[in-house]
Image (tube, rainbow, N blue to C red):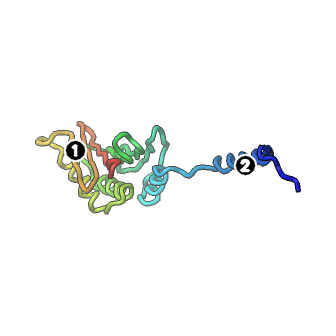
Amino acid sequence: MMALRPGFRRPALLAAALVTLAAVSASPARADRCEDTAKQLAGAIDGLKVGISAANYIYLSHPAARELSLGCRGQNFSIELYAKTDRKPKPEFFNLVAGAAAIIFTVPKDDTATGTSRCIKRMGILRGDKVSMRFRRLNMECSRTKTEASIVVTRGKDE
């Protein structure tokens, strides 16, 4: 009987193992959660189009909003919805933001509609042009200028 020496290793076996490991680790990665959410929004909301993505933001477009974007992985939030419209928002804008926030944060659309309309309608003489509020575990920050109003809806990383 022939015994193998303990220090003897086959270089071909080692090379084959390394090639297999490299092939498995180089498989194409799945799209991140933010891109999946943007595609889901485009499929669920009529007229919404997904634009370019840059610096952890995916820019969206819709006729009811001047600007619309989906932000991913910020310092204090995991995902963010930003929308801007005229100073006096129309019901279509509220419907758009409520529908998008409901899909993104997986909460009922009625709750997001109530929260977004409260936030935007609270701006005025008594509370000023910038309002921050919390509604149903969502952080909402509304602001306005002389010509436009905007809302940012986020959820904290720890929630």
Q: Which residue is mark 2?
A: 17
Query: In terms of image quadrants, where is residue 11?
Result: top right
Between 124 and 24, the residue placed more toward the observer is 24
Q: Reply above or below: 123 against 117.
A: above
Between 61 and 110, the residue placed more toward the observer is 110
Q: Reply above or below: 20 against 43.
A: above
Check disc 2 and give the amino acid type: Ala
State left or right for residue 5 relative to residue 147.
right
Q: Position of residue 47 (x, y in %)?
A: 43, 55
Helix, strand or loop status at disc 1? strand
Give neighbour class at mark 1: few <14, some 14-19, many 20+ (Cα, 10 Å). Answer: some
Q: Position of residue 33 (x, y in %)?
A: 47, 52
Between 105 and 150, the residue placed more toward the observer is 105
Residue at 24% over, 40% down: 144
Helix, strand or loop status at disc 2? helix
Residue at 24% over, 58% down: 114
Cα distance between the residues tagged 1 and 2: 56 Å
Q: Which residue is mark 1?
A: 132
Which mark's residue is nearer the viewer, 1 or 2? Answer: 2
Check disc 1 and give the amino acid type: Ser
Give neighbour class at mark 2: few <14, some 14-19, many 20+ (Cα, 10 Å). Answer: few
Residue at 46% over, 59% down: 43
Q: Position of residue 34 (x, y in %)?
A: 46, 49
Among numbered discs 1 and 2, the one appearing first in the sequence: 2
Question: What quarter of the picture does the N terminus occupy?
Answer: bottom right
